[in-house]
């Protein structure tokens, strides 16, 4: 079983839709959760960084963490064509040693069409 | 220059060639990383340096050799690669090891 599972999609939605991207994980030791956005031919860009269970909002983006279910989500409201990208979830344990290295999901390809 | 830069952006090399990838971070960070990104696979951590000391080597074949001369620069030396090494190689940096990581644009490597 993979430590982090992410549906690779692809996911295609019309402009203005609410998008839900999800990851599940098996390691209860993960404490920090991140979402990265990667445009074609670019490196990943950090979008959201969360620690505890609950919601964190930043503009049109909301990150949700449910540690009891080992499930994280990224919601995009009023999606735009410029949101078309691959979205990667990542997570790690606490600590600054190799114990705390990032584990990534496979990435979900999102296309928002006008 | 801002953020994390990588050169070259694209590289085609034969299996007998020797080449190097370069990464430079302009963020004042203390940790730097090399990742490999292959199609339909999660990002794979290859090497980690903290304050110029290597702290992680994820069983990477010896045909990949990292070098970190100072906290701003990171190299990946390549020799006698295999076609399956073709991938996007990403460099990243963070202020504290394994905390928020910032990525460069990557080098798209093709081994023929």
Image (spheres, rainbow, N blue to C red):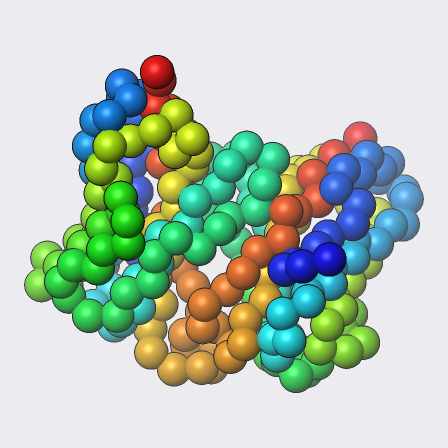
Quadrant housing the N terminus of chain B: bottom right
B61 relative to A59 in the view: left or right: right
Q: Residue lying farthest top?
A: A114
Q: Residue furthest right?
A: B17
Judge by depth and name the residue closer to the eye, A86 or B58: A86
Q: Is residue A4 visible?
A: no
The percent coordinates of residue A69 (x first, y second) are 10, 57
Q: Tell me: A63 left or right of A48.
A: left
> In this picture, is B49 found above or below A65?
below
Residue depicted at 57% across the width and 46% down the height: A43
Compared to residue B93, the image places residue A99 above or below, namely below
Quadrant housing residue A108:
top left
Horizontally, residue B5 falls left or right of residue A26, namely right
Instruction: Please tell me which residue lies in front, B106 or B5.
Output: B5
> In which quarter of the view is residue B66 placed?
bottom right
Quadrant where the C terminus of chain B is found in the figure: top right
> Horizontal and vertical percent for residue B99?
45, 73
- Number of numbered discs visible in the structure rendering: 0
* Residue drawn at 59 percent across, 61 percent down: B92
Visible in this render: residue A59? yes
Query: In this orientation, which residue lies closer to the viewer: A10 or A4?
Result: A10
Q: Is residue B112 left or right of residue B98?
A: right
Q: Where in the figure is residue A9, as x and y percent of width and height?
A: 32, 28
Image quadrant where residue B58 sits: bottom right
- Estimate the x, y position of residue B7 in percent, counting from the top left: 78, 49
- Residue ranking furthest to the left: A68
Q: Residue furthest front?
A: A59
Q: Nearer the viewer, residue B10 or B67?
A: B10
Instruction: Identify the residue shown where x is 77% and y is 63%.
Output: B75
């Amino acid at each position: 079983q993979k430590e982090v599972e992410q549906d690779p999609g692809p996911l295609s939605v019309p402009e203005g839709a609410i998008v839900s991207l999800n990851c599940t994980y098996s390691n209860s030791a993960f404490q920090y959760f991140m979402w990265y956005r990667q445009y074609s031919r670019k490196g990943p860009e950090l979008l959201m960084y969360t620690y505890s269970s609950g919601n964190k909002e930043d503009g049109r983006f909301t990150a949700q963490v449910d540690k009891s279910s080992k499930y994280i989500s990224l919601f995009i409201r009023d999606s735009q064509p410029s949101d078309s990208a691959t979205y990667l979830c990542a997570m790690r344990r606490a600590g600054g040693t190799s114990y705390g290295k990032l584990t990534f999901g496979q990435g979900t390809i999102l296309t928002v069409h006008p | 220059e801002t953020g994390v830069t990588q050169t070259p952006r694209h590289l085609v090399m034969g299996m007998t060639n020797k080449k190097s990838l370069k990464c430079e971070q302009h963020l004042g960070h203390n940790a730097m990383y090399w990742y490999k990104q292959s199609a339909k696979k999660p990002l794979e951590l290859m090497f980690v340096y903290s304050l110029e000391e290597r702290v992680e080597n994820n069983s990477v074949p010896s045909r990949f050799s990292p070098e970190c001369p100072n906290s701003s620069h990171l190299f990946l030396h390549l020799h006698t690669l295999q076609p399956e090494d073709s991938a996007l190689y990403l460099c990243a940096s963070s202020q504290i090891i394994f905390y928020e990581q910032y990525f460069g644009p990557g080098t798209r490597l093709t081994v023929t």
